[in-house]
Amino acid sequence: MGNIIDSRLVYNINNSDVESFNITFATTFLQNYRIQLSHNINFNSNFSDTQLRVVFDLPFLRSNTNLSKSVFTQSVLGSVNYNNIFNDFDFHNRGMVGKSAAAIRFFLDENNNNLFERGEQQIEDMNVNINSIGNKRQLSNGSIVINDLEAYTKYDVTLIDKKSKNPLWFPVREKFSFISDPNHFKEVAIPFL
């Protein structure tokens, strides 16, 4: 939560005059609402306009309303991703077309084939660091879903042990990388021995 005041003055050195001026006040309240009030003046065209913008953010949609003396717009944006690896739905407050996601699973590899198979125990107390600002959430079974990744990008991942798993289990790799695919969940299975 906070307040921002921003102003811009455009001065044309060649003509020795002020071309435009803008002042904006923005504040966030109730964690999900943002109000922005802007006033613009263009001195060359003798035009001025005041605009009110209200943004409402929920995890599954974003509403954006703009109102001025010449314009009224309302937009609502949201998306739903289906994760076929974990049979799970993810809701987002921005568009996800062209984006990528990762589905990370930790498991005890009982037959040492590096593949997760039905019946193998999932490990619930691991986490990851990833070089991304994507939206990360942990499922109840310990799996991790990371959404809002850029497509065709190499992501480096480091395992974080929460120290509550069996101390005799060790991951095959503690650091790894993967390349994300557009409009797709990348399955990443991390075997433990």
Image: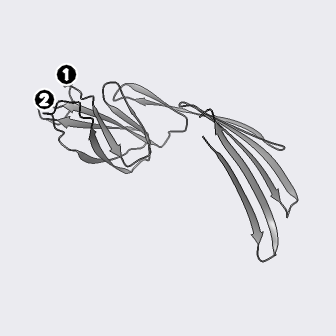
User: Which residue in the protein does label 2 denote?
Assistant: 110
Q: Give me the residue at 48% from left, 43% from top.
A: 98
Q: Give me the residue at 42% from left, 47% from top.
A: 151
Q: In which quarter of the image is residue 12?
A: bottom right
Q: Give me the residue at 31% from left, 25% from top.
A: 141
What is the residue that sits farthest to the bottom in this orientation?
14
User: How many marks on residues?
Assistant: 2
User: Which residue in the protein does label 1 denote?
Assistant: 119
Of callouts 2 and 1, the N-terminal one: 2
- Label 2 and label 1: CA atoms lie apart by 9 Å
Vertical placement of residue 42 versus 137, above or below: below
Q: Quadrant of the C terminus?
A: top left
**Picture coordinates of residue 112, whole percent (x, y):** 12, 34
Vertical placement of residue 70 versus 107, above or below: below
Classify mark 1: helix, strand or loop: loop
Closest to the observer, 10 or 104: 10
Residue contact at pointers 2 and 1, CB within 8 angstroms: yes
Q: In the displayed structure, does residue 191 sit left or right of residue 128?
A: left
Vertical placement of residue 97 versus 154, above or below: above
**Picture coordinates of residue 132, whole percent (x, y):** 41, 47
- Give amino acid for label 2: Glu
